[in-house]
């Protein structure tokens, strides 16, 4: 029979094995805690990177919407310019044909269109001008609707 430990009534060898098992468990627990801490830091880093990417995507989306809006304005301006050019060509053609009544009528239409569109803020160089006649970039000379 094995020697018995005084207080617990268990054999010494069994008590020694139990202490070793507890130590192994403690070492394993310590390793697991370290790994969990490392994983937590990695997850925090991933969340931070995702947040930054989300912010960049939102910024890109905003810029895309702004570019789309500016493109639409450019298209409208191009159409408007084409209308004015066509009208000017008709005025020149009427003058060449010595049809001064038609030329005067077309010139009057041109003036009316320009005055009407000037009030709407469509006569501008690029997209610097706002509807109220002020300029986004502070360069008032770039706007026709001063």
Image: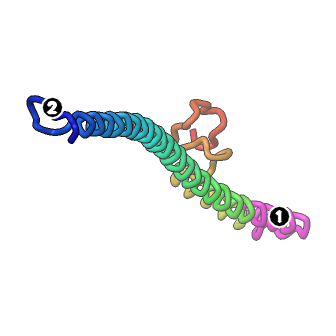
- In primary-sequence order, the first of circles 1 and 2 is 2
Residue 5, numbered circle: 2
- Specify whether residue 92 is painted magenta: yes
Q: Is residue 127 left or right of residue 25?
A: right
What secondary structure predominates along the stretch shown in magenta? helix
In the figure, 104 relative to 6: above or below? Answer: below
- The crowd level at tag 2 (other Cα within 10 Å; few <14, some 14-19, many 20+) is few
Q: Secondary structure at mark 2?
A: loop
Residue 101 x %, y %: 76, 68
Write down the residue under mark 1: 89
Rendered residue at 30%/38% (across/down): 17
Which sits in the foreground, 38 or 129?
A: 38
Residue at (80% x, 64% y) in the render? 91
Highlighted magenta segment, given as a residue range: 84-104
State left or right for residue 44 relative to residue 108. Answer: left
| Residue at 62% across, 31% down | 139
Q: Quadrant of residue 105?
A: bottom right
Secondary element type, mark 1: helix
Instruction: Please name whichever residue, 56 or 142, is drawn nearer the observer in this view of the structure.
Output: 56
> Which numbered dot is residue 20?
none
């Amino acid at each position: 029979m094995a020697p018995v430990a005084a207080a617990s009534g268990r054999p010494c060898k069994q008590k020694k094995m139990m202490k070793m098992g507890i130590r192994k468990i403690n070492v394993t627990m310590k390793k697991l805690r370290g790994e969990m801490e490392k994983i937590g830091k990695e997850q925090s880093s991933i969340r931070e990177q995702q947040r930054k990417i989300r912010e960049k995507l939102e910024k890109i989306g905003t810029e895309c919407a702004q570019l789309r809006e500016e493109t639409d304005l450019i298209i409208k301006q191009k159409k408007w310019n084409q209308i004015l050019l066509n009208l000017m060509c008709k005025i020149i053609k009427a003058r060449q044909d010595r049809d001064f009544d038609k030329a005067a009528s077309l010139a009057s239409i041109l003036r009316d269109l320009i005055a009407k569109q000037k009030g709407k803020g469509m006569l501008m160089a690029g997209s610097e001008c706002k509807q109220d006649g002020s300029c986004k970039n502070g360069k008032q000379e770039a706007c026709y609707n001063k």
